[in-house]
Image (tube, rainbow, N blue to C red):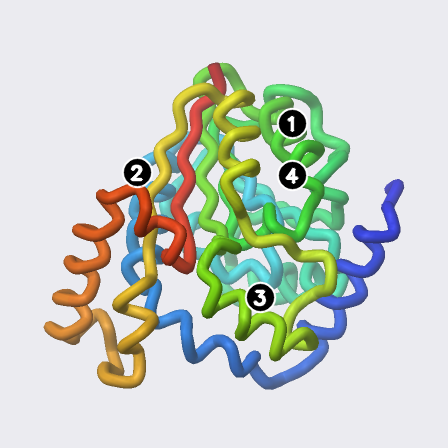
C-alpha cells in the first residue's frame, strides 16, 4: 500500500485518536447537525438494501454496522487506520454482523473497477486529496451508482477561527470544503445534490439538550433550511450532505 506523507500523518493521527478511550471534546457540538446525520442515514438506508456497499473511511465501523442491518448484498468498510479496522472487526464479531473490513488507502484502493452500487462516507473527503479520492470513488462505482458524503465546510469565519484556536483537535492536513471543491465534484459527477446544515442549530446549541426531542431545535432547523435557500448564507453553514450519481 503506497502512502503519501499526508496519508502517513492521517494514519498516525487517527491511530492515536482511536487508541484513546475517551471521546473528543468537539463531539459535544455534533448535536447541532443531528438533522444532517438523520438525512445521511435515511438516504443510505433507502439505497443499500440488496446492493453492494462501501463505507469509505469507516473508522471503527459505527455507521457500517447500522447499514449492515439494512440487508445489503455485501458491505465493505475501509480505512487507513489499522487500529480502527481492528476495532471494527472485533465489534462486528460481537454483533454477529457479516461485514468485510480492510486496511486501505482510500485514494488508491485494491478493489476492481465498478465494484459497488453505493459508496458513502462521513467526514472523510476533507482528510484526503479530493481529486484522487473523488476519481477513485468514481472508478469504484458501477454505472448509475450513488455516492453519499457528509463533509464540513471551511467558509464560516467564526468556525474557522475556532479551528485556529484548537489545532490539536484535528489533523494538520484536513481541509474543510470550499467553493472550488464543489466545482471539481460537479465537473466529475455532473449534477450534485448539496444540502447545507448547522447555523442557528450550532449558534444556539447550549439551549437544547436532545435535538430529537427538542421543539426549539426543530424551530432552529427550520430557520436554517429557510436561510440556506439564499445562496449567500450558505457560507455560514457548518456542514453539507453531498449526493452524486455516476453517469
Q: Earlier in the sequence, mark 4 or mark 3?
A: 3
Q: Nearer the viewer, mark 3 or mark 2?
A: 2
Q: Secondary structure at mark 1?
A: helix
Q: Nearer the viewer, mark 3 or mark 1?
A: 1
- 97 or 46: nearer the eye? 46
Q: Nearer the viewer, mark 4 or mark 3?
A: 4
x, y percentage for residue 134? 61, 32
Q: Earlier in the sequence, mark 1 or mark 2?
A: 2
Residue at image mark 2: 46
Verify CB contact (< 8 Å) between mark 2 and mark 4: no
Does residue 89 appear to the left or right of 104 in the view shown? left
Q: Earlier in the sequence, mark 2 or mark 4?
A: 2
Q: Is residue 102 above or below residue 199?
A: above
* Residue under the image location 17 percent in, 51 percent down: 226
Q: CA distance from mark 3 to mark 2?
A: 24 Å
x, y percentage for residue 198? 33, 61
* Residue under the image location 50 percent in, 62 percent down: 62
* Residue under the image location 76 percent in, 34 percent down: 108
Residue at image mark 3: 91
- In the rendered image, which quarter is residue 16 located in? bottom right
- 72 or 54: nearer the eye? 54
Q: Is residue 245 above or below residue 87?
A: above
Residue at image mark 1: 135
Q: Estimate how packed mark 2 is, as few (under 14), some (14 to 19) or many (20 or more) residues with alpha carbons within 10 Å.
A: few
Q: CA distance from mark 3 to mark 1?
A: 31 Å
Q: Secondary structure at mark 2?
A: helix
Q: Earlier in the sequence, mark 3 or mark 1?
A: 3
Verify CB contact (< 8 Å) between mark 3 and mark 2: no
- 231 or 113: nearer the eye? 231
Of the numbered discs in the image, which one, if any, rests on residue 130? 4
Q: Earlier in the sequence, mark 3 or mark 2?
A: 2
Amino acid at each position: 500500500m503506497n502512502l503519501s506523507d499526508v496519508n502517513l500523518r492521517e494514519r498516525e493521527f487517527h491511530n492515536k485518536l482511536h487508541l484513546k478511550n475517551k471521546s473528543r471534546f468537539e463531539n459535544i457540538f455534533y448535536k447541532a447537525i443531528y438533522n444532517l446525520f438523520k438525512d445521511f442515514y435515511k438516504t443510505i438506508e433507502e439505497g443499500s438494501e440488496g446492493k453492494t456497499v462501501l463505507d469509505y473511511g469507516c473508522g471503527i465501523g459505527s455507521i457500517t454496522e447500522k447499514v449492515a442491518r439494512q440487508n445489503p448484498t455485501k458491505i465493505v468498510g475501509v480505512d487507513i487506520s489499522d487500529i480502527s479496522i481492528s476495532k471494527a472487526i472485533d465489534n462486528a464479531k460481537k454483533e454477529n454482523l457479516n461485514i468485510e473490513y480492510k486496511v486501505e488507502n482510500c485514494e488508491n484502493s485494491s478493489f476492481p473497477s465498478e465494484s459497488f452500487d453505493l459508496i458513502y462516507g462521513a467526514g472523510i473527503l476533507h482528510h484526503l486529496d479530493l481529486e484522487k479520492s473523488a476519481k477513485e470513488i468514481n472508478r469504484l462505482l458501477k454505472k448509475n451508482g450513488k455516492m453519499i458524503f457528509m463533509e464540513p465546510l471551511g467558509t464560516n469565519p467564526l468556525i474557522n477561527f475556532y479551528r485556529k484556536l484548537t489545532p490539536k483537535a484535528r489533523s494538520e492536513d484536513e481541509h474543510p470544503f470550499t467553493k472550488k471543491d464543489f466545482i471539481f465534484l460537479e465537473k466529475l459527477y455532473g449534477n450534485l445534490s448539496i444540502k447545507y446544515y448547522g447555523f442557528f442549530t450550532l449558534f444556539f446549541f447550549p439551549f437544547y439538550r436532545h435535538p430529537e426531542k427538542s421543539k426549539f431545535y426543530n424551530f432552529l432547523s427550520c430557520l436554517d433550511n429557510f436561510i440556506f435557500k439564499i445562496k449567500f448564507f450558505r457560507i455560514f453553514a457548518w456542514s453539507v450532505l453531498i449526493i452524486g450519481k455516476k453517469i
